[in-house]
Amino acid sequence: MPRERCHRCHTILTSEDKHWYSVACESCEKDLKWEEYEQHNPIKSAYWRWRAICFGVRWLRFGTAAGLGICLRPLLRRLDARRQLQNARRER
């Protein structure tokens, strides 16, 4: 006789679980209800989507700036050395 398992976490369900929660266990059923509530609550879901988009844009912006800073550092050092040399010539 095959035992029924929860379709999310694969724990073996008792007959009482199957009677009350169908094919999911109690903890997974609560998780599913919470996810459904979060997805169908338009204000909360829009807020968290906006936060995720802002975080992604911020990460890309600062990551790109850091990458450019690393790539351009040798060029900036050369320019700075050239400026210091020109300033030293002017002071003489």
Image (spheres, rainbow, N blue to C red):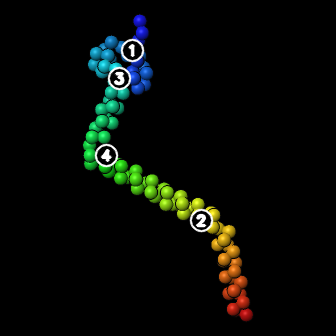
Q: Are marks 2 and 1 in contact (CB under 8 Å)?
A: no
Q: What is the C-alpha distance between the residues marked 3 and 1? A: 10 Å
- Along the polypeptide, which appears first: circle 2 or circle 1? 1
* 30 in relation to 92, above or below: above
Q: Mark 4 points at which residue?
A: 45
Indicate the quadrant containing the C terminus: top left, top right, bottom left or bottom right. Answer: bottom right
| Mark closer to the chain start, 2 or 3 | 3
Residue, x 33% and y 12% (percent of image)?
A: 15
Q: Where is residue 82 in the image (x, y as percent from the top left)?
A: 69, 80
The label shown at residue 4 is 1
Contact check, label 4 and label 1, Cβ < 8 Å: no
The quadrant of the picture occupied by the N terminus is top left
Name the N-terminal-most of marks 2 and 4. Answer: 4
Q: Name the residue under label 2.
A: 69
- Which three-letter amino acid code belongs to the residue tagged 1? Glu
Residue 26: where, in percent of width, then height?
Answer: 33, 24
Which numbered tag is attached to residue 51? none
Q: Is residue 21 left or right of residue 1?
A: left
**Amino acid at circle 3:** Ala
Q: In this view, does 56 lie above or below 86?
A: above
Disc 2 from disc 1: Cα separation: 57 Å
Q: In this view, does 55 lie to the left or right of 90?
A: left
Q: Earlier in the sequence, mark 3 or mark 4?
A: 3
Q: What residue type is labelled 4?
A: Ser
- Within-10-Å neighbours for mark 4: few <14, some 14–19, many 20+: some
Quadrant of the image occupied by residue 25: top left
The residue that label 3 is drawn on is 24
Labels 3 and 4 touching (C-beta < 8 A):
no
Q: Position of residue 46 (x, y in %)?
A: 31, 49
Identify which residue is drawn at 26% across, 48% down. Answer: 43
Q: Distance between the residues labelled 2 and 4?
A: 36 Å
